């Protein structure tokens, strides 16, 4: 597999870390420096409870230094489960005869978006299975993004559409970019070549390098925000993290920037998949927490995403260990957000979900922990993407703008969608957050808050 030196990774996984080495590495993280693959390996191999607590404390420090007390909210929108690939762990697999196939029309996509707008969502991740025709894929993706942006609920519109779809060539990515997407996301699933080929048995996805090349093609097409990640549970998770670090080093060397986001989904049961119910490499919650914390230290500038695959309790813990983006009230079924839409979730979803809380309930939990839920998309509108974003994120300067924008989007949510209880908690947190701002920032915030009171929405810096 391109960019991945399996022999080197296996050698690193046989090393040990001394307390002196651990402290040296953790001191380096305080300067917000990205760690080497060797240093990442040493952190992954830590087992002692006392040393794990040091890693967790360092991860929390780095996350709050770069991103502040802000958690970005988004929701996935599955638009099609028609797939030409057969992957042993996926409910959408082409050879899964149990799955009921659906491809939403553009009007249905718009209707789904309006349902999400009514709940208060402002950021969407489009997810689609890979159809046979690349031209069909591209036209559908572009039409879907335009349909989402056209949706409107009482003046509320989606601020940013990110997209997780099949690999494309450079020219196709250029066309996709013109539709107004933010981040292009694609998961390698597993960086271990033997495992990859064993699990992907039919379709274009059988070639692991095709997925790696997709990131290169996106960069070459001018899409400078990309998201990557493994599906944890398919192979040794420590191998996967180190291999992903190799991929990141390759991207930084060749394009000057790494991924805008990293996702770390764990495999969950999927309709029609016996493999997904019995993964070969089960990962305990404690191991998973360590992986998230180590990633925050290893790639401090990147957003770390946790989905509703995880339980509510674990997700509440992970926001303290480095997670900066979470999904909320997710459905992984095309048409799943409309209770009147004809569907059978048990036969149409891609995998099982564990956090079933509503958006309002998740926001309440974040507020109770002192975090500011954010629906902001200002960076995309102000060209703070790619290298421009990294130049602000790496030294920890991005939060200076994000703190204001996050509070503005929180007030918008509280005014338009929040339950009375959440509204009260939210405004208490806003007052505490304002106390940490300088006078110049307070003046900007007060103006934006007055705009909201006057009915104006979507102000940002």
Image: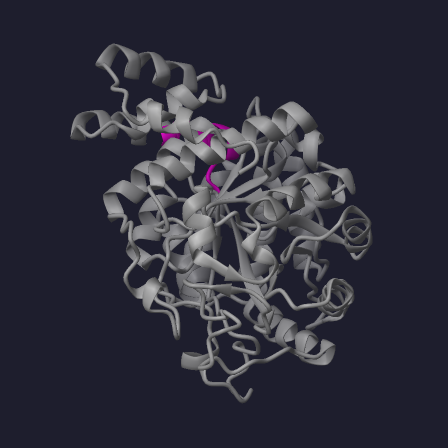
**Residue 392 in sight in this render:** no
Give the residues in magenta: 59-70
Query: Which quadrant holds residue 397?
Result: top right
Report the colour scheme. Answer: one colour
Front-most of 402 and 334? 334
Whether residue 411 sits left or right of residue 429 in the image: it is right
- The location of residue 155, given as percent across then percent down, is 72, 68
Residue 126 placement, left or right of 295: right
The residue drawn where x is 35% and y is 41% is: 237
Q: Is residue 126 left or right of residue 345?
A: right
Q: Is residue 129 above or below residue 32?
A: below
Q: Whole-percent x and y of residue 264?
A: 43, 47
Main secondary-structure element of the magenta-colored stretch: helix
- Residues 112 and 203: in front is 203
Where residue 139 appears, x then y in whole percent?
78, 66
Query: Residue 265 placed where, x, y %?
Result: 42, 52
Residue 417 visible in the displayed image = yes
In the picture, the quarter occupied by the C terminus is: top right
Q: Is residue 63 above or below residue 395?
A: below
Q: Any magenta on residue 386?
A: no
Residue at 30% of width from left, 32% of height from top?
56
Residue drawn at the location 34% of the way across and 36% of the way down: 238
Judge whether 95 appears above or below 396 on screen.
below
Q: Quadrant of residue 136?
A: bottom right
Q: Quadrant of residue 291?
A: top left
Query: Does the stretch in magenta take in 67?
Result: yes
174 and 296: which one is in front? 174
- Is residue 374 depicted above or below 424 in this figure? above
């Amino acid at each position: 597999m391109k960019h991945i030196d399996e022999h080197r990774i296996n050698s690193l996984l046989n090393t040990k870390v001394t307390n002196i080495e651990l402290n040296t590495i953790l001191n380096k993280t305080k300067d917000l420096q990205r760690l080497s693959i060797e240093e990442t390996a040493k952190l992954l191999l830590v087992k002692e409870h006392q040393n794990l607590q040091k890693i967790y404390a360092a991860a929390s420090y780095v996350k709050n230094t770069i991103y502040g007390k802000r958690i970005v909210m988004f929701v996935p929108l599955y638009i099609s489960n028609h797939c030409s690939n057969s992957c042993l762990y996926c409910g959408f697999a082409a050879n899964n005869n149990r799955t009921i196939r659906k491809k939403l029309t553009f009007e249905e996509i718009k209707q789904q978006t309006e349902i999400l707008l009514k709940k208060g969502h402002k950021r969407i991740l489009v997810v689609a299975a890979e159809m046979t025709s690349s031209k069909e894929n591209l036209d559908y993706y572009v039409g879907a993004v335009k349909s989402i942006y056209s949706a409107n609920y009482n003046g509320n519109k989606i601020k940013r559409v990110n997209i997780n779809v099949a690999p494309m060539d450079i020219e196709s990515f250029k066309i996709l970019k013109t539709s107004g997407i933010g981040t292009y996301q694609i998961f390698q699933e597993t960086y271990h070549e033997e495992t990859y080929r064993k699990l992907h048995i039919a379709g274009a996805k059988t070639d692991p390098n095709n997925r790696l090349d997709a990131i290169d093609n996106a960069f070459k097409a001018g899409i400078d925000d990309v998201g990557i990640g493994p599906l944890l549970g398919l192979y040794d998770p420590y191998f996967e993290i180190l291999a992903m670090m190799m991929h990141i080093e390759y991207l930084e060397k060749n394009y000057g920037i790494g991924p805008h986001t990293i996702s770390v989904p764990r495999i969950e049961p999927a309709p029609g998949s016996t493999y997904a119910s019995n993964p070969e490499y089960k990962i305990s919650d404690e191991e998973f927490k360590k992986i998230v914390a180590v990633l925050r230290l290893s790639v401090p500038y990147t957003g770390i995403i946790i989905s509703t695959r995880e339980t509510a309790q674990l997700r509440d813990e992970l926001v303290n260990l480095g997670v900066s983006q979470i999904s909320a009230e997710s459905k992984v079924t095309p048409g799943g957000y409309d209770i009147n839409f004809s569907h059978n979730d048990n036969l149409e979803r891609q995998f099982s979900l564990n956090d079933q809380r509503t958006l309002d309930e998740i926001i309440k939990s974040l507020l109770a922990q002192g975090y500011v839920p954010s629906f902001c998309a200002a960076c995309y509108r102000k060209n703070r993407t790619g290298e421009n974003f990294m130049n602000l994120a790496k030294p920890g300067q991005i939060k200076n703008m994000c703190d204001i924008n996050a509070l503005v989007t929180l007030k918008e949510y509280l005014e338009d969608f929040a339950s009375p209880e959440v509204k009260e908690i939210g405004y208490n947190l806003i007052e505490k957050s304002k106390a940490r701002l300088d006078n110049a920032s307070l003046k900007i915030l007060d103006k934006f808050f007055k705009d909201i009171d006057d009915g104006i929405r979507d102000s940002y810096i």
